[in-house]
Amino acid sequence: MVILLGRALSRESRAEIDAIVPGARVVSEADPSLVGRMEACNAGQHAGYEERADRMFLDDLRSYAAGRPLEHVVDKEAGY
């Protein structure tokens, strides 16, 4: 699995990704070989944003790895 992120993760979050999806390749730049992707968006940062964004992303990654529906999904019709 390839995980494309728009920013660097903390060492703790990176270790969690390795525990959830062993062998995952985490990249922080566009890779044209990617067909689908999960991203942690960083628009609208505030105090505590990165920790919360990491937690939400890791929760969805756990769900994805377990075959469960994702909780934090973009509603393209609503625009967010």
Image (cartoon, rainbow, N blue to C red):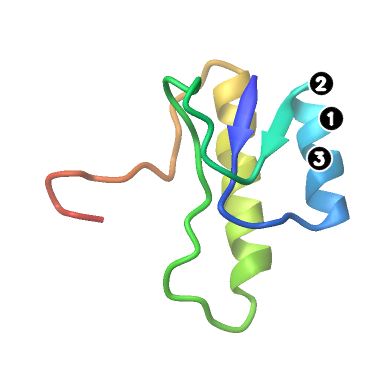
Check the image and name the residue furthest to the top. Answer: 67
Mark 3–mark 1 Cα distance, whole angstroms, equals 5 Å
Placement of 52 over or under 5, stated as above or below? below
Residue 15, image x and y in percent?
A: 86, 41
Question: What residue do we see at 54% from left, 82% from top?
Answer: 46
Q: Residues within 10 Å of mark 3 (few under 14, many from 20)?
A: some
| Quadrant in which the C terminus appears | bottom left
The residue singled out by tag 2 in the image is 22
Q: Tell me the SS state at disc 1.
A: helix
Task: Indicate which disc residue 49 carries.
Answer: none
Residue 19, image x and y in percent?
A: 84, 30
Check the image and name the residue furthest to the front. Answer: 32
Placement of 16 over or under 24, stated as above or below? below
Say what amino acid the circle numbered 3 marks: Glu
Contact between labelled residues 2 and 1, with CB atoms less than 8 Å apart: yes
The residue singled out by tag 1 in the image is 19
Mark 1–mark 2 Cα distance, whole angstroms, equals 6 Å
Question: What residue do we see at 50% from left, 20% from top?
Answer: 33
Say what amino acid the circle numbered 2 marks: Pro
Contact between labelled residues 1 and 3, with CB atoms less than 8 Å apart: yes
The residue singled out by tag 3 in the image is 16
Q: Tell me the SS state at disc 2.
A: loop
Say what amino acid the circle numbered 1 marks: Ala
